[in-house]
Amino acid sequence: MWGPFLVMGCVMLVLGGGLLYVQGGYNEVEWDYTDCICRGTGMNATDYLQTSKPSGPCKCIKELNITEENNQAKWDRDILLYYELENFHQNHRQYADSRDDKQLNGDRLRSDGFPDLPFSDCEDPHNNDNSSGEILPIVPCGSIANSLFNDTVKLFFKRDNSEEWKPVSLLNTGIAMAFDKKRFNNPVEDDQLKTELEGKIAKPRDWTKHLWELDEDQPSNNGLENEDLIVWMRAAPLANFRKLWRRVDHEDKSHAELRDGLLTSYLYKLEIEYNYDVSSFKGRKKVIIARDNEFGAKNKSMGWIAISAAIFFFSFGFLFSALRRLDQ
């Protein structure tokens, strides 16, 4: 009886060691910008957000060294940008359940074909703060949608200090899982969101944009089908988590020199528009630049989980072996 436990222990030990070696060795650069200084103000970003009349959006700048503590030969395509939040419990049951999946799928409609009020378990299901006084459904409703991450990121590069910074084209599509994208659909045609829904729905309480303003340049990525929204709506199982934010467009001809990846001889700079306040839950924010791979971003937790499972199997294997010897 003890034999299968020892075999499984060996399998999990080899798997864990392999994952630690492979996933722990990927190149990545991270910047904790929680307490960054807003350009032109000299103020801490968190303090700036809490001022009564901010003069404009807070923008933080960081020049990067992508070769430090990294293998210089491994910055080949595809390059991804992630955001990371710490101490944010998306896995809280009431928070994760505060949504209306029928609404998100575009099926919560009245008889006239327009969005209906969501079910009562969805926090803040409606809003009557509008010119007509009519009760409007909040779309999307719920706590998880209301807390949508809304910082923005830009990446720049230049060959040396004698040149001006050039923008790197970043893609905001192709970041959501195909399975998730099937579950999010607009209640009207993608290019008719504002025309059909303005005055018939309300935006979530903490949003600064309307639903049809999430990506006005790409109708297929606007509204409930916006991939930033879809990525956010997949609740993370742990309090510290990363979510895919942007992809470097290696095919953009304006920076053909980055076609095969990030060149380590170049200089790089990040610019963050700081909108998301993490002070209320004592959290922190990071942006991570990493190379795409089969196992996702650099993450040793999977390896340690496999090794923990190996210890579990070995422990029970030795326990059953000792019990068998005592019975003989």
Image (cartoon, rainbow, N blue to C red):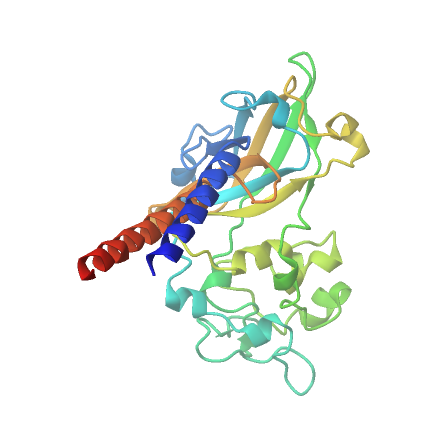
On the rendered structure, is 146 left or right of 92?
right
On the rendered image, what quadrant is the N terminus found in? bottom left
The residue furthest right is 253
Quadrant in which the C terminus is drawn:
bottom left
**In the image, farthest residue toward the front:** 328
Residue drawn at x 43%, y 57% as measured from the top left: 237
Q: Residue at x 73, y 28 (%)?
A: 258
Q: Is residue 116 left or right of residue 276?
A: right
Residue 189 horizontal/vertical position (percent):
75, 69
Residue toward you, 28 or 301: 301
- How far across and down, in percent of the image, does residue 115 sit? 62, 77
Locate residue 26: give its quadrant.
Answer: top right
- Viewer-nearest residue: 174 or 121: 174
> Looking at the picture, does residue 163 appear above or below residue 287?
above
Report which quarter residue 182 is drawn in.
Answer: bottom right
Residue 69 in the image, given as x and y percentages of width and height: 49, 22
- Of all residues shown, which one is farthest toward the bottom? 111
Is 18 drawn above or below residue 203 in the view shown?
above
Left or right: 245, with 323 as reference point:
right
The answer to whether residue 57 is visible is no
Q: Is residue 160 above or below residue 194?
A: above
